[in-house]
Image: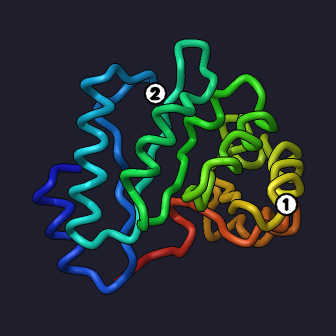
Amino acid sequence: PAPDLISEVIESVNIPVRVMIRPRNGNFVYNEDELEHMKACVEFCKKKGAEGVVFGVLHENNALNIEAIEMLTEAAKPLKVVIHKAFDNTPDLQEALTQLISIEGIDTILTSGGKSNAFDGAENLKALLKQAGTQIEIMPAGKITQFNLTEFHHMVDAQVYHGRLIVGELD
């Protein structure tokens, strides 16, 4: 989001705010200028009092760009860091998870288990949750709503979930 919107949201709500850091739509392969812009956005969010930042960076072959992720994670400290669903594009989810666990400062991976939605990726999500243990939080996402959360929880037994309609109507 634009810096003024980030500031307005952080100042207006009494809940933790995690800001998506994404310089443009499209793929998650970023050039040096885009990475520098992302770093500046991370630093802005830190200065404004965000709880965390959310990002993902890939190479052309869809493998994680570990160097860029490490640079952005370091810039974010002590904020929480969430790796978003760019993770789902990686060719080997288990290897990608191992790489992310090794980076100090990453708290959460937002994932549909490599599929278009969490239900289709449920088996992969269970495997990721088992592999992650307590080292990193796996947050299933993708078509999880207030109407199917209980069913989905029985399928994968995660600690946290993400969904646009997960809490129902808000006043």
Image location of residue 91, percent across then percent down = 73, 23
The disc label shown at residue 156, or none: 1
Task: Say which amino acid is labelled 1.
Answer: Val
User: Which element carries disc 1, helix, strand or loop?
Assistant: helix
Q: Quadrant of residue 95?
A: top right
Image location of residue 166, percent across then percent down = 57, 68
- Is 114 on the left or on the right of 62, as rendered? right
Residue 150 against residue 162 in the figure, above or below: below
Q: Residue furthest left?
A: 4
Q: Nearer the viewer, mark 1 or mark 2?
A: 2
Q: Residue at x 21, y 57 (%)?
A: 44
Q: Residue at x 50, y 42 (%)?
A: 70
Image location of residue 137, percent across then percent down = 68, 62
Q: Quadrant of residue 146?
A: bottom right
Task: Say which amino acid is labelled 2.
Answer: Phe
Q: CA distance from mark 1 to mark 2?
A: 27 Å
The disc label shown at residue 45, or none: none
Q: Nearer the viewer, residue 4 or 152?
A: 4
Q: Residue at x 16, y 50 (%)?
A: 2
CA neighbours of label 1 inside 10 A, class few (<14), some (14 to 19), many (20+) = many
Whether residue 142 appears in this view of the structure is: no
Residue, disc 2: 28
